[in-house]
Image: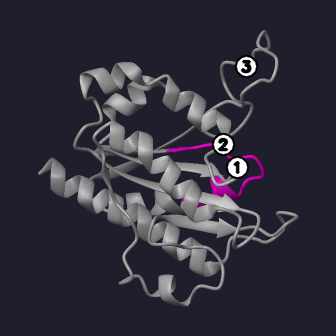
């Protein structure tokens, strides 16, 4: 079994839910396994530390998870058209993997959740691609052959799976958003399997 690392940060749970659907898509491909990981919050106080193991959910990611994966799905909520600080903080610590080329040639996809339809979801997805391109990863988007991409009234873009949660974050992940997340995971895993062969 080859592992696809599904790495995300989620503040209200929407990105976490997208990650679980992406993982379902990954695991629908024979020989592929989803390795769910998250990152801790970034403290505004330099001396503050959090627990080494999260209270619930998947374990925190390690740089070894990056080196061992056959592909990466990276998820973050939108923060003013950019990824959230915890994801950026983790990526900023991957210089060793960049120097060694540990991610070069591996496929990657991105996913996000935002409050409003025009809240920066596509800009966030594009900003998340930049460090992955610097690592030499091969970006995998969502093609318009996925029917839901043309019909969704909520999230979903050719740049990656997404969710629109509403200004109060109360909108659940829609069926179309779920289907697009599953499709994104399946496509990423299929491409990873082909590259590995």
Quarter location, residue 145: bottom left
**Which label's residue is closer to the chain start, 1 or 3?**
3
Residue that badge 1 annotates: 79
Q: Is residue 186 visible?
A: yes
**Which label's residue is closer to the chain start, 1 or 2?**
1
Give the residue drawn at x 55%, y 50%: 75
Disc 1 packing (10 Å; few <14; some 14–19; many ≥20) = some
Q: Could you give the CA–CA distance between mark 1 and mark 2, rounded to whole angstroms?
A: 6 Å
Q: Could you give the CA–CA distance between mark 1 and mark 3, rounded to whole angstroms?
A: 24 Å
Q: Nearer the viewer, residue 107 or 64?
A: 107
How is the rendered protein coloured?
one colour
Q: How far from the left and from the top, in percent, is residue 18?
A: 59, 60
* Circles 1 and 2 in contact, beta carbons < 8 Å: yes
The mark closer to the camera, 1 or 3, is 1
Q: Nearer the viewer, residue 169 or 173?
A: 169
Residue that badge 2 annotates: 84
The answer to whether residue 148 is left or right of residue 64 is right
| Vertical order, 62 against 145 (above or below) | above
Q: Magenta stretch containing residue 182, yes or no?
A: no
| Vertical order, 1 against 170 (above or below) | above
Q: Could you give the CA–CA distance between mark 3 and mark 2, rounded to whole angstroms?
A: 20 Å
Q: How far from the left and from the top, in percent, is residue 54?
A: 69, 29
Residue that badge 3 annotates: 51
């Amino acid at each position: 079994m080859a592992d696809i690392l599904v790495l995300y940060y989620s503040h209200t749970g929407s990105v976490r839910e997208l990650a679980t659907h992406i993982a379902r898509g990954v695991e629908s491909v024979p020989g592929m396994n989803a390795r769910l990981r998250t990152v801790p919050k970034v403290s505004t106080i330099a001396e503050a530390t959090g627990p080494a193991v999260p209270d619930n959910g998947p374990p925190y990611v390690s740089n070894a998870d990056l080196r061992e994966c056959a592909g990466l799905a990276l998820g973050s909520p939108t923060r003013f058209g950019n990824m959230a600080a915890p994801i950026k903080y983790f990526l900023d610590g991957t210089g060793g993997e960049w120097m060694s080329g540990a991610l070069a040639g591996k496929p990657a996809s991105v996913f996000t959740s935002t409050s409003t339809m025009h809240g920066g979801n596509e800009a966030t997805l594009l900003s998340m691609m930049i460090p992955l391109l610097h690592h030499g990863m091969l970006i995998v988007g969502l093609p318009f052959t996925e029917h839901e991409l043309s019909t969704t009234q909520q999230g979903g873009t050719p740049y990656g799976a997404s969710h629109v949660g509403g200004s109060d974050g109360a909108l659940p992940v829609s069926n179309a958003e779920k289907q697009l997340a599953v499709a994104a995971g399946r496509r990423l895993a299929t491409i990873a399997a082909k590259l590995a062969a």
